[in-house]
Image: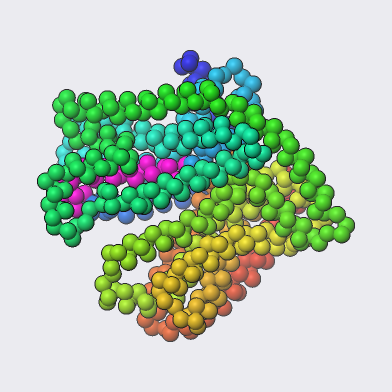
């Protein structure tokens, strides 16, 4: 592999991935874009500052606890492992989108490039994205540990390499899995959808295995005998962790060892990652291009099929609103990046709630604290169901997901209100999975009675509508239409960042107000008043949304 060719490929891929040249040109041409860019940078900067203020306290508390137990090495191991696992679960579909759905492959496949060269070029792009996770989780932990334990320069040199390679194992694991499974999926018709679903199944299996292997590497602080054994022989728990996440084991040993032992473990760490690159080289040459060629043929046949479907929806006898809803579902299900992300988003938060509920039930919450929490039960359950459904990824991408098909939507002789109703109904049909899951889990955990349940349902619906309409308003004001990979319309859409900030910012402020108001106002009166307030707000946002949608569909694209 020629290094210059690979560097050139990576630089072009980076420019295309982040639209650097295009954005530079747009900012020069349109000063309004510069204001949006500055606003985005300012929002991200504020978020980062707030995040690190909380995160430093978490690092201090964790390291102090591990130092007391003489288990400082576990601090490093846990944060290396945590950043890797986040990378695995958050980056899997980004990787599939970049490798199998990106339109630039149609160009790359015609160039004099070997499959492994294309793979390593694209792998760098995915790793570049994933490094944000390590930047937020791992790097502060490595630096803080070095300062706290007064490490030498060698530690920091190894730390930099550990940081740079921290996302290789999770990304390579998914990539190797998809390369192998792509060979098995060649015979099936809907290969891309099956690739997404099989990867989702793989992630679920990994999550289940991690959950049930918790006892393998957990520490029971209340068990004095177990704690004594671990303190005397901390290597025991590290050896168990090696089976769960090998890079964390090798990296931790390389960081804490001294002399020749440090060099040996560091070489093992590098050797492990070199093995992953060799496997990728071998499997990439064998499977990658052939599977992508089949996917390209499948996309061509889908376009013909889509045209036939549209003729069938919008005939003279069809109901326009039903036809629009069918259109929403058709493009949602026919695009795996949309369908898998949509369903995953509304399931992730309820699953997290279930896990936290199990943890709290095992640990046990002091009775006086639990009694205090129960006084806010209807609002807590409401916020759980609202979070489970509003983080759906569909609201802030309702028009962005249209892409070039927005021109098609403009040409249809349909009222703005009908278009919005179809989109809202579709969003709520998907998000109802998260809404009902969160509501049921919260009701069972907090033991709501029938009247509390009804009040919570009404309140949750009003807040949920408010947050979803707000996200739709963000997207219709600045839709991301010029994407070359459907994954980007949801996962790399800046509207998603603003939507997330608004959701968590709103719930944070709202939670604080509830905390202050419940002791002085009757909960049922407060619930009814807030439900009425959000009903009025929803009506106002709905009118604004209609106006913004009219402006979007009226202007030239």
- Residue 231 in percent (x, y) is at 13, 48
Question: In the displayed structure, does residue 302 sit left or right of residue 381?
Answer: right
Observer-nearest of 61 and 291: 291
| Quarter of image, res 556 | top right
Q: Is residue 551 visible?
A: no
| Quarter of image, res 405 | top right
Relative to 487, residue 295 above or below: above
- Magenta span: chief secondary structure: helix
Question: In the displayed structure, does residue 72 sit left or right of residue 413?
Answer: left
- Colour convention of the picture: rainbow
Q: What count of labels does the image hold?
A: 0
Q: Residue at x 67, y 66 (%)?
A: 543
Question: In the displayed structure, does residue 202 sit left or right of residue 478?
Answer: left
- Residue 348 in percent (x, y) is at 47, 55
Relative to 415, residue 528 above or below: below
- Which quadrant: the C terminus? top right
Q: Is residue 502 magenta?
A: no
Q: Is residue 521 visible?
A: yes
Q: Please, which residue is most extreme toward the top here? A: 2
- Residue 238 in percent (x, y) is at 23, 41
| Quarter of image, res 173 | top left
Q: Please, which residue is most extreme toward the right here? A: 316
Image: magenta residue range: 63-91
Q: Residue at x 56, y 45 (%)?
A: 197
Q: Residue at x 53, y 79 (%)?
A: 454
Observer-nearest of 34 and 21: 21
Q: Is residue 76 magenta?
A: yes
Q: Residue at x 61, y 26 (%)?
A: 290
- Residue 461 in percent (x, y) is at 56, 71
């Amino acid at each position: 592999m020629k290094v210059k060719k690979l560097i050139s490929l990576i630089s072009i891929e980076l420019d295309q991935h982040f639209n650097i040249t295009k954005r530079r040109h747009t900012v020069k041409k349109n000063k309004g874009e510069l204001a949006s860019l500055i606003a985005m940078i300012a929002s991200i900067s504020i978020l980062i500052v707030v995040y690190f203020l909380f995160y430093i306290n978490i690092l201090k508390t964790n390291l102090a606890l591990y130092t007391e137990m003489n288990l400082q090495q576990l601090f490093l191991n846990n944060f290396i492992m945590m950043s890797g696992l986040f990378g695995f679960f958050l980056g899997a579909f980004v990787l599939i989108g970049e490798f199998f759905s990106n339109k630039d492959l149609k160009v790359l496949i015609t160039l004099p490039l070997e499959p492994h060269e294309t793979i390593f070029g694209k792998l760098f792009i995915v790793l570049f994205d994933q490094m944000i996770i390590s930047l937020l989780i791992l790097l502060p932990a490595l630096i803080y540990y070095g300062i706290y334990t007064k490490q030498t320069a060698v530690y920091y040199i190894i730390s930099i390499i550990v940081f740079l390679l921290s996302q290789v194992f999770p990304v390579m694991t998914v990539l190797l899995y998809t390369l192998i499974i792509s060979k098995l999926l060649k015979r099936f018709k809907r290969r891309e959808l099956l690739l997404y679903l099989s990867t989702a199944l793989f992630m679920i299996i990994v999550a289940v295995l991690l959950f049930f292997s918790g006892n393998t590497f957990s520490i029971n602080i209340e068990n004095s005998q177990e704690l004594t054994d671990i303190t005397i022989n901390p290597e025991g728990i590290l050896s168990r962790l090696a089976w769960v996440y090998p890079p964390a084991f090798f990296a931790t040993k390389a960081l804490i060892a001294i002399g020749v032992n440090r060099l040996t473990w560091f070489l093992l760490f590098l050797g492990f990652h070199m093995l992953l690159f060799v496997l990728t080289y071998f499997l990439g040459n064998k499977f990658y291009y052939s599977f992508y060629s089949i996917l390209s043929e499948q996309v061509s046949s889908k376009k013909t099929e889509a045209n036939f479907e549209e003729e069938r929806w919008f005939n003279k006898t069809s109901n326009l609103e039903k036809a629009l809803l069918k259109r929403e579902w058709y493009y949602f299900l026919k695009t795996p990046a949309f369908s898998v992300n949509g369903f995953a988003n509304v399931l992730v938060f309820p699953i997290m709630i279930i896990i936290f509920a199990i943890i709290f039930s095992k640990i046990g919450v002091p009775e006086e604290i639990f009694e205090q929490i129960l006084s806010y039960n209807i609002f807590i359950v409401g916020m759980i169901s609202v979070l489970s459904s509003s983080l759906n990824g569909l609201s802030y991408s309702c028009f962005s997901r249209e892409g070039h098909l927005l021109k098609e939507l403009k040409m249809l002789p349909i009222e703005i209100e009908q278009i919005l109703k179809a989109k809202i109904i579709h969003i709520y049909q998907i998000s109802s999975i998260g809404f009902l899951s969160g509501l049921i889990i919260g009701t069972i955990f907090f033991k709501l009675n029938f009247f509390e349940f009804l009040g919570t349902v009404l309140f949750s619906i009003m807040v949920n509508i408010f947050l979803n309409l707000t996200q739709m308003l963000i997207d219709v004001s600045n839709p991301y239409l010029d994407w070359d990979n459907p994954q980007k319309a949801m996962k790399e859409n800046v509207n998603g960042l603003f939507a997330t900030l608004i959701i968590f910012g709103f719930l944070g402020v709202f939670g604080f107000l509830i905390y202050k108001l419940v002791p002085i106002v009757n909960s049922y009166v407060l619930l009814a008043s807030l439900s009425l307030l959000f009903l009025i707000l929803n009506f106002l946002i709905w009118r604004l949304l209609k106006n913004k949608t009219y402006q979007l569909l009226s202007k030239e694209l």
